[in-house]
């Protein structure tokens, strides 16, 4: 084992704290039981700080700490574009998506699709989402987390996978979204604090006695080729981050889909007290996003500068934790990484259980299910999805950059999903048949382009497929000649009105991002 008794004590304290808080907030008053609104949407009572913290804790996982550090090691600062463009995506979603969702008082994204289109669209997308969440996201989080535990503590990967699954399952399966969201507030403190400590120590070492700021200067001098946000075609990482596409191309498809149409993220906003509270939470998350590359990309570049002896890129962050951090600090950093993994696992399981229970189980298997049965089914859905992920996770061990694997294969669903939602919002003539064709076409177009043009960067492919899906919806509406749908959304200017504080905060984020891209273009 590569961890001291002090570090292990700190880590155990963190585990006990999270489990205690998770189980404590999951309590119900004597003589009462959770209903579906309590379990799946925390009683629609989340405050902005809980929403913002939970969004970040759910988003930042092993995919970022391990996967993005690995890509930072291999590619460089260009990986930060995922986080910085996400800050803009959160602003757009908060202003234009959230008011529509909350006005509809929906529980799930498939539910919105049923209300705007029909039951077929809802069911197809629900099945797609369940498959992606279980077989791509849940499994990759478990794998990357277990990889880190293996490198730091010497535990065999399968034990790390099972241990993480049990830890996340103990409180999230029982407590539902409220337990997940409120423990996420603690988790985000650990992951940001622990991540900053790791980055500081790595930069301090590169400073050669002159401090972390000098270390960053030395890092930039030593690895200047890695400090470019826009890659040219000669760069080996161009296929994953194809130049200007990260600003005006396919990355926006992934970005708006992930933050605005993804149950895993948007469920926190659906549980808000009000539209204004949800928007404040998302802008709060946007500010945190500006700092995330410092936690998850810079360490990977630092590992490269320190000439870490790695067999594959995804070992960069585990190497830093194992070899650079002193006793005591290692325990905090390890707790931070575990916090990121466990919070994402818990959030993913909650979203899986919500979609399965409300969009598959209730309408097709038990139409008359009562509230108690729905909560029980949600818990079983979480448990079964976790068992499946445990079985599949070890199969990912052959990957070099797991983060890129996740992005590429999620990209098979995101163009179609985003086109359907945008059409549902803003194209009053969009039909259910068009939406269904776009959902299926997203996979068909993606598969064909991957086969016909294997050298085409997947991000560009995603942008092209999105255009095809949008055209499919428009052409279908023209062929059907049904006119304005009776289910179309009534869009008004007042619906998208935001507070002065929101607008100021959004402008500050945009100015900061403009400065980043000007400096490191």
Image: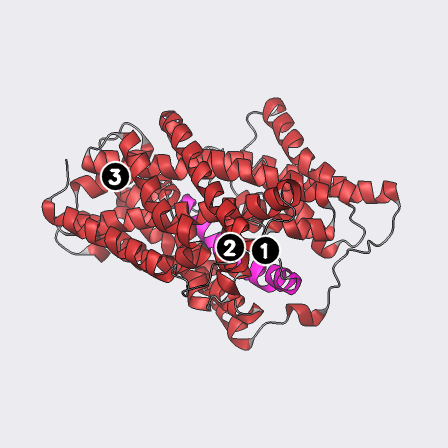
How far apart in space, not on screen, are marks 2 and 3 (Cα)? 34 Å
Q: Tell me the SS state at disc 2.
A: helix
Residue 398, given in percent of the width and then of the height, sits at: 37, 24
Quarter of the image holding residue 155? top left
Q: Is residue 94 magenta?
A: yes
Q: Nearer the viewer, mark 2 or mark 3?
A: 2
Does the CB distance between marks 1 and 3 fall below 8 Å? no
Find residue 104 and report its horizontal and vertical position in percent: 66, 61
Residue 285: x and y in percent read: 44, 61
Quarter of the image with the N terminus in it? top left
* Mark 3 lies on residue: 318
- Asked if labels 2 and 1 touch by Cβ distance under 8 angstroms, the answer is yes
Kindly indicate the quadrant of the structure image that contains residue 446: top right
Q: How packed is label 3: few (under 14 Cα within 10 Å), some, or many (20 or more)?
A: many
> In this orientation, does residue 29 appear?
yes
Whether 141 is drawn above or below 56: the answer is above
| Residues at marks 1 and 2, CA–CA distance in whole angstroms | 8 Å
Res. 40 mark:
2
Q: Is residue 73 visible?
A: no
Read off the magenta span. 77-104
């Amino acid at each position: 084992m590569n961890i001291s008794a002090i570090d292990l004590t700190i880590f155990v304290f963190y585990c006990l704290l999270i489990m205690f808080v998770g189980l404590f907030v999951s309590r119900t008053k004597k003589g009462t039981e959770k209903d579906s609104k309590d379990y799946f949407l925390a009683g629609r009572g989340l405050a902005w700080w809980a929403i913002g913290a939970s969004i970040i804790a759910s988003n930042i996982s092993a995919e970022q700490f391990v996967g993005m550090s690995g890509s930072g090691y291999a590619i460089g600062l260009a990986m930060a574009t995922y986080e910085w463009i996400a800050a803009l995506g959160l602003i757009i979603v908060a202003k234009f998506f959230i008011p529509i969702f909350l006005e509809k008082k929906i529980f799930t994204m498939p539910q919105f699709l049923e209300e705007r289109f029909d039951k077929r669209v809802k069911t197809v997308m629900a099945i797609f989402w369940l498959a992606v969440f279980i077989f791509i996201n849940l499994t990759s989080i478990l794998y990357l987390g277990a990889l880190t535990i293996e490198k730091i503590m010497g535990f065999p990967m399968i034990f790390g996978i099972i241990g993480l699954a049990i830890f996340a399952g103990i409180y999230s399966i029982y407590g539902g979204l409220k337990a997940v969201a409120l423990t996420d507030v603690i988790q985000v403190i650990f992951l940001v604090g622990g991540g900053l400590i790791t980055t500081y120590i790595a930069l301090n070492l590169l400073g050669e006695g002159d401090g972390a700021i000098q270390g960053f200067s030395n890092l930039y001098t030593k690895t200047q080729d890695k400090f470019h946000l826009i890659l040219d075609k000669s760069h080996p990482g161009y296929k994953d981050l194809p130049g200007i596409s990260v600003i005006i191309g396919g990355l926006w498809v992934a970005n708006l889909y992930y933050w605005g149409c993804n149950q895993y993220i948007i469920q926190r906003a659906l549980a808000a007290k009000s539209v204004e509270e949800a928007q404040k939470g998302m802008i709060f998350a946007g500010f945190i996003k500006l700092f995330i590359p410092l936690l998850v990309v810079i360490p990977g570049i630092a590992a490269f500068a320190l000439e870490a002896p790695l067999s594959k890129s995804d070992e960069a962050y585990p190497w830093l934790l194992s070899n650079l951090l002193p006793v005591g600090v290692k325990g905090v950093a390890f707790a931070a990484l575990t916090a990121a993994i466990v919070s994402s696992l818990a959030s993913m399981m909650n979203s899986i259980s919500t979609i399965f229970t409300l969009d598959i189980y209730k309408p097709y298997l038990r139409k008359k299910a009562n509230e108690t049965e729905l909560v029980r089914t949600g818990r079983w859905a979480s448990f079964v999805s976790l068992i499946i992920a445990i079985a599949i996770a070890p199969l990912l061990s052959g990957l070099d950059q797991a983060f890129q694997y996740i992005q590429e294969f999620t990209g098979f669903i995101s163009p179609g999903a985003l086109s359907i939602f945008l059409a549902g919002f803003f194209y009053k003539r969009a039909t259910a048949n068009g939406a269904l064709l776009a959902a299926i076409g997203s996979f068909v177009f993606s598969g064909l382009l991957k086969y016909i043009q294997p050298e085409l960067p997947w991000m560009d492919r995603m942008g092209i497929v999105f255009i095809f899906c949008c055209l499919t919806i428009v052409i279908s509406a023209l062929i059907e000649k049904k006119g304005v749908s009776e289910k179309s959304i009534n869009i008004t200017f007042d619906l998208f009105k935001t507070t002065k504080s929101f607008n100021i905060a959004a402008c500050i984020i945009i100015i900061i991002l403009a400065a980043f891209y000007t400096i490191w273009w």
